[in-house]
Protein backbone atom coordinates (compact mmCIF):
# COMPACT_ATOMS: atom_id res chain seq x y z
CA UNK A 1 0.00 0.00 0.00
CA UNK A 2 1.44 3.37 -1.00
CA UNK A 3 1.17 6.51 1.08
CA UNK A 4 -0.80 8.70 -1.33
CA UNK A 5 -1.55 12.34 -0.71
CA UNK A 6 -5.22 13.18 -1.18
CA UNK A 7 -5.96 15.52 -4.06
CA UNK A 8 -6.58 19.07 -2.87
CA UNK A 9 -8.42 21.70 -4.86
CA UNK A 10 -6.20 24.53 -6.01
CA UNK A 11 -6.23 27.31 -3.45
CA UNK A 12 -5.84 30.44 -5.61
CA UNK A 13 -7.48 33.49 -4.01
CA UNK A 14 -7.92 31.74 -0.64
CA UNK A 15 -6.49 32.33 2.82
CA UNK A 16 -4.29 29.74 4.47
CA UNK A 17 -4.58 30.01 8.23
CA UNK A 18 -1.81 28.35 10.22
CA UNK A 19 -3.17 25.71 12.56
CA UNK A 20 -2.02 25.97 16.20
CA UNK A 21 0.39 23.03 15.85
CA UNK A 22 2.35 24.77 13.06
CA UNK A 23 5.36 26.07 14.98
CA UNK A 24 7.60 27.27 12.12
CA UNK A 25 8.66 30.80 13.18
CA UNK A 26 7.72 32.30 9.80
CA UNK A 27 4.28 30.75 9.61
CA UNK A 28 3.20 30.26 13.22
CA UNK A 29 -0.05 32.20 13.80
CA UNK A 30 -0.04 33.47 10.22
CA UNK A 31 -2.53 34.13 7.47
CA UNK A 32 -1.25 33.70 3.92
CA UNK A 33 -3.11 35.02 0.91
CA UNK A 34 -2.68 32.47 -1.88
CA UNK A 35 -1.80 34.09 -5.20
CA UNK A 36 -1.18 30.93 -7.20
CA UNK A 37 -1.56 27.20 -6.63
CA UNK A 38 -1.28 24.54 -9.31
CA UNK A 39 0.33 21.16 -9.90
CA UNK A 40 3.79 22.79 -10.06
CA UNK A 41 3.60 24.41 -6.61
CA UNK A 42 2.15 27.38 -4.79
CA UNK A 43 2.90 31.04 -4.09
CA UNK A 44 1.39 33.40 -1.52
CA UNK A 45 1.93 36.37 0.76
CA UNK A 46 1.77 36.37 4.56
CA UNK A 47 -0.59 39.24 5.39
CA UNK A 48 -0.42 39.60 9.16
CA UNK A 49 3.25 39.93 10.14
CA UNK A 50 4.79 43.41 10.26
CA UNK A 51 8.37 43.65 9.05
CA UNK A 52 9.27 46.48 11.43
CA UNK A 53 9.48 49.19 8.76
CA UNK A 54 6.81 51.37 7.26
CA UNK A 55 6.16 52.32 3.67
CA UNK A 56 7.61 55.83 4.03
CA UNK A 57 10.97 54.24 4.97
CA UNK A 58 10.84 52.17 1.78
CA UNK A 59 10.04 55.34 -0.18
CA UNK A 60 13.17 57.02 1.24
CA UNK A 61 15.31 54.06 0.11
CA UNK A 62 13.76 54.22 -3.37
CA UNK A 63 14.01 58.04 -3.65
CA UNK A 64 10.23 58.37 -3.88
CA UNK A 65 8.76 61.52 -2.33
CA UNK A 66 5.18 61.03 -1.18
CA UNK A 67 2.58 63.69 -1.81
CA UNK A 68 0.46 65.25 0.93
CA UNK A 69 -2.32 62.64 0.49
CA UNK A 70 -0.02 59.74 1.37
CA UNK A 71 -1.13 57.67 4.37
CA UNK A 72 1.69 55.59 5.83
CA UNK A 73 1.30 51.94 6.71
CA UNK A 74 3.49 49.03 7.83
CA UNK A 75 5.33 46.86 5.33
CA UNK A 76 4.64 43.18 5.89
CA UNK A 77 6.98 40.18 5.99
CA UNK A 78 5.41 38.32 3.07
CA UNK A 79 7.44 35.17 3.60
CA UNK A 80 10.95 33.75 3.68
CA UNK A 81 11.54 33.68 -0.11
CA UNK A 82 12.73 36.66 -2.20
CA UNK A 83 12.95 38.84 0.92
CA UNK A 84 14.53 41.66 -1.08
CA UNK A 85 11.59 41.88 -3.51
CA UNK A 86 8.46 43.93 -2.97
CA UNK A 87 4.98 42.63 -3.71
CA UNK A 88 1.98 44.97 -3.78
CA UNK A 89 -1.42 43.33 -3.42
CA UNK A 90 -4.23 45.71 -4.38
CA UNK A 91 -7.83 46.10 -5.54
CA UNK A 92 -7.87 48.52 -8.49
CA UNK A 93 -6.49 47.14 -11.75
CA UNK A 94 -4.56 50.22 -12.91
CA UNK A 95 -2.06 50.32 -15.75
CA UNK A 96 1.11 49.32 -13.92
CA UNK A 97 3.98 47.26 -15.25
CA UNK A 98 4.39 43.73 -13.93
CA UNK A 99 0.82 43.51 -12.70
CA UNK A 100 -1.32 40.39 -12.86
CA UNK A 101 -4.85 39.50 -11.83
CA UNK A 102 -5.20 37.01 -8.99
CA UNK A 103 -8.99 37.20 -9.12
CA UNK A 104 -11.56 39.47 -10.75
CA UNK A 105 -10.96 42.02 -7.96
CA UNK A 106 -7.43 41.45 -6.60
CA UNK A 107 -4.16 42.16 -8.39
CA UNK A 108 -0.49 41.64 -7.66
CA UNK A 109 2.10 44.15 -8.87
CA UNK A 110 5.87 43.98 -8.48
CA UNK A 111 6.96 47.16 -10.28
CA UNK A 112 7.96 50.53 -8.82
CA UNK A 113 5.40 52.50 -10.82
CA UNK A 114 2.58 51.41 -8.49
CA UNK A 115 4.60 52.65 -5.49
CA UNK A 116 5.06 56.04 -7.21
CA UNK A 117 1.30 56.18 -7.78
CA UNK A 118 0.56 55.22 -4.15
CA UNK A 119 2.98 57.88 -2.87
CA UNK A 120 1.22 60.52 -4.93
CA UNK A 121 -2.33 59.50 -4.04
CA UNK A 122 -2.94 58.13 -7.55
CA UNK A 123 -2.56 54.43 -6.77
CA UNK A 124 -5.02 51.88 -5.51
CA UNK A 125 -6.89 52.86 -2.36
CA UNK A 126 -6.86 49.33 -0.95
CA UNK A 127 -3.40 47.77 -0.95
CA UNK A 128 -0.75 46.11 1.15
CA UNK A 129 2.99 45.90 0.60
CA UNK A 130 5.17 42.93 1.51
CA UNK A 131 8.84 42.18 1.22
CA UNK A 132 9.28 38.51 0.46
CA UNK A 133 6.80 35.79 -0.31
CA UNK A 134 5.97 32.21 0.57
CA UNK A 135 6.35 29.40 -1.93
CA UNK A 136 5.91 25.65 -1.99
CA UNK A 137 7.26 23.10 -4.46
CA UNK A 138 5.09 20.63 -6.33
CA UNK A 139 3.09 18.58 -3.82
CA UNK A 140 4.56 20.32 -0.76
CA UNK A 141 1.48 22.34 0.16
CA UNK A 142 -0.73 19.30 -0.40
CA UNK A 143 1.40 17.35 2.09
CA UNK A 144 1.15 20.19 4.64
CA UNK A 145 -2.62 20.36 4.17
CA UNK A 146 -2.90 16.57 4.65
CA UNK A 147 -0.85 16.94 7.87
CA UNK A 148 -3.38 19.51 9.20
CA UNK A 149 -0.83 22.36 9.18
CA UNK A 150 -3.20 24.74 7.40
CA UNK A 151 -6.87 25.62 7.25
CA UNK A 152 -8.11 27.14 4.00
CA UNK A 153 -10.77 29.81 4.12
CA UNK A 154 -12.52 32.27 1.88
CA UNK A 155 -10.96 35.64 1.17
CA UNK A 156 -12.47 38.69 2.77
CA UNK A 157 -11.51 42.25 1.79
CA UNK A 158 -11.99 43.26 5.41
CA UNK A 159 -9.35 40.75 6.56
CA UNK A 160 -7.03 41.38 3.62
CA UNK A 161 -6.93 45.16 3.66
CA UNK A 162 -8.62 46.64 6.74
CA UNK A 163 -8.32 44.69 9.97
CA UNK A 164 -5.42 45.24 12.37
CA UNK A 165 -2.70 42.64 11.78
CA UNK A 166 -3.29 40.95 15.15
CA UNK A 167 -6.97 40.31 14.33
CA UNK A 168 -6.45 38.69 10.92
CA UNK A 169 -5.84 35.07 11.99
CA UNK A 170 -9.06 34.82 14.00
CA UNK A 171 -11.08 36.71 11.41
CA UNK A 172 -9.82 34.59 8.49
CA UNK A 173 -10.76 31.38 10.32
CA UNK A 174 -14.10 32.90 11.28
CA UNK A 175 -15.00 33.32 7.57
CA UNK A 176 -15.75 29.57 7.62
CA UNK A 177 -17.16 29.54 11.14
CA UNK A 178 -14.10 28.34 13.06
CA UNK A 179 -12.82 29.90 16.27
CA UNK A 180 -9.08 29.26 15.88
CA UNK A 181 -8.55 30.06 19.57
CA UNK A 182 -10.54 26.97 20.57
CA UNK A 183 -8.36 24.57 18.57
CA UNK A 184 -5.70 22.58 20.38
CA UNK A 185 -2.11 22.50 19.14
CA UNK A 186 -2.39 18.69 19.42
CA UNK A 187 -5.22 18.39 16.86
CA UNK A 188 -4.76 15.51 14.45
CA UNK A 189 -2.09 13.77 16.55
CA UNK A 190 -2.58 10.49 18.34
Image (spheres, rainbow, N blue to C red):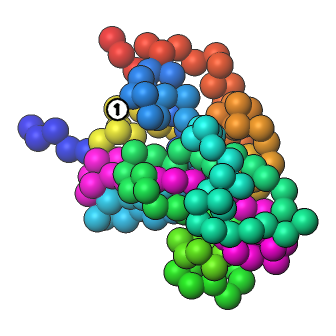
Q: Nearer the viewer, residue 159 or 47?
A: 47
Where are the magenta residues, as a range?
115-141
Of 66 and 92, the residue lying toward us: 66
In the rendered view, would you say 108 is above or below 113?
Answer: above
| SS at badge 1 | loop
Measuring 51% from the left and 33% from the top, which residue is drawn there?
A: 18
Q: Quadrant of the N terminus?
A: top left
Residue 176, x across and y down, in percent: 68, 40
Residue drawn where x is 35% and y is 39% of the image: 144
In-image side of 75 versus 2 (left or right): right
State the residue lying farthest toward the right: 68
**Residue underneath mark 1:** 147
Image quarter of residue 105: bottom right
Instruction: Work out which residue is located at the far left of the displayed protein and give it.
Output: 1
> Is residue 131 a member of the stretch shown in magenta?
yes
Report the side of 142 relative to 165 (left or right): left
Residue 124: image location, x then y, percent: 77, 71
Residue 165 coordinates in the image, percent (x, y)? 70, 37
- Residue 86 percent across, percent down from the top left: 52, 61
Amino acid sequence: MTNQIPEITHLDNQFLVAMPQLQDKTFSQSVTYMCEHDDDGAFGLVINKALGVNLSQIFVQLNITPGPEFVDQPVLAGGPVHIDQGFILHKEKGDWKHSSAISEEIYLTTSLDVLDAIANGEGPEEFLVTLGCASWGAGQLEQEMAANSWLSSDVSDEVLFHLPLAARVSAAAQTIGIDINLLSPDIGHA
